[in-house]
Image (cartoon, rainbow, N blue to C red):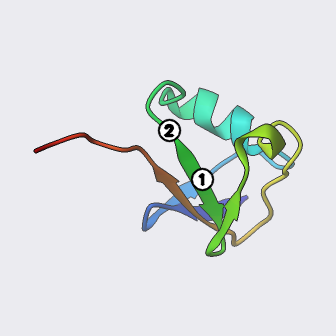
Amino acid sequence: MQIIINGETRNVADHCTISELIETLGIKVKVMAAAVNMEIVKKEAWDTHQIKEGDKLELLHFVGGG
């Protein structure tokens, strides 16, 4: 299925969860927050929240600075 991740169109497996997607992308350690269609999904729900065709995901990590 086709989804948009951080503004980039990607093809991913059907019925994958946020956790599975993050693992597939190899960015598990970096991701601190996830939003699907502009709604934050709590980290404890990543294992069960299934991504649907056409979803827009923002996977965010925080950078410290000063």
Q: Quadrant of residue 17?
A: top right
At x 42% / y 68%, what residue is drawn?
A: 7
Residue density around tag 1, few if under 14, some if 14–19, many if 20 or more, within 10 Å: many
At x 60% / y 36%, what residue is drawn?
A: 22
- Residues 9 and 59: in front is 59
Q: Amino acid at mark 2?
A: Val
Answer above or below: position of 40 versus 30: below
Q: Is residue 47 left or right of residue 12?
A: right
Residue 62 image point, x, y percent:
36, 44
At x 41% / y 44%, what residue is drawn?
A: 61
- Residues 54 and 27: in front is 27
Q: How many marks?
A: 2
Residue 44 image point, x, y percent:
79, 39
Residue 47 image point, x, y percent:
83, 36
Name the residue that disc number 2 marks: 31
Q: Amino acid at mark 1?
A: Ala
Name the residue that disc number 1 marks: 34
Q: Quadrant of the N terminus?
A: bottom right
